[in-house]
Image: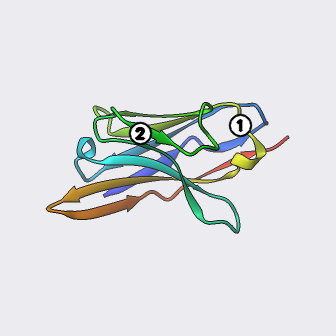
Amino acid sequence: VQLVESGGGLVQPGGSLRLSCAASGFTFSSADMSWYRQAPGKERDLVAVTSSAGGSTNYADSVKGRFTISRDNAKNTVYLEMNSLKPEDTAVYYCKAVRVVTNIQHNYWGQGTQVTVSE
């Protein structure tokens, strides 16, 4: 199982970035996919989640209206479109996959990608 994030970088406040997470080694279309973030000295928090078919999404209050999670099951990839970025969005962003197989939950994490919002 492998999750590889990309698309992070340095952006000015008010700018945009699109993160990607390419998955392999499991049935992507059966997994709920989510993005988390962790700022220095803080816990890792949920940012957004999408169901396996992409029909259901949820967001942290702090990013509602600014971030959009989407997935392409044909490409085994989940995205996070981030607009109107703020300095407080600065964090390492992680992709997570959750699969339930015979009532056992399996969680997979990527290595993270750094997003820095600064002048």
Which residue appears farthest toward the left when viewing the image? 102
Q: Amino acid at mark 2?
A: Val
Residue of label 1: 85
Location of the C terminus (image quadrant): top right
The residue positioned 71% from the left and 37% from the top of the image is 85
Q: Residues within 10 Å of mark 1 (few under 14, many from 20)?
A: many
Residue 50, compared with residue 111, is above or below; it is: above
Left or right? Give the position of 100 relative to 84. left
Left or right? Give the position of 21 relative to 116. left
Disc 2 to disc 1: CB gap under 8 Å: no
Q: Amino acid at mark 1?
A: Leu
The residue positioned 38% from the left and 47% from the top of the image is 33
Give the spatial CA distance, label 2 vs label 1: 19 Å
Q: Position of residue 71 (x, y in %)?
A: 38, 34
Q: At numbered mark 1, what does the secondary structure look like: helix, strand or loop?
A: loop
Q: Position of residue 45 (x, y in %)?
A: 56, 57
Residue 21, compared with residue 70, is above or below; it is: below
Examine the image and state in which quarter residue 73 appears. Answer: top left
Q: Residues within 10 Å of mark 2 (few under 14, many from 20)?
A: many
Left or right? Give the position of 76 relative to 91. left
Question: In this view of the protein, which residue sits in the foreground, 13 or 42?
Answer: 42
Q: At numbered mark 2, what does the secondary structure look like: helix, strand or loop?
A: strand
Which residue appears farthest toward the bottom when viewing the image? 41
Q: Position of residue 89 (x, y in %)?
A: 69, 47
Residue of label 2: 78
Marked residue nearer the N-terminal end (2 or 1): 2
The residue positioned 27% from the left and 55% from the top of the image is 99
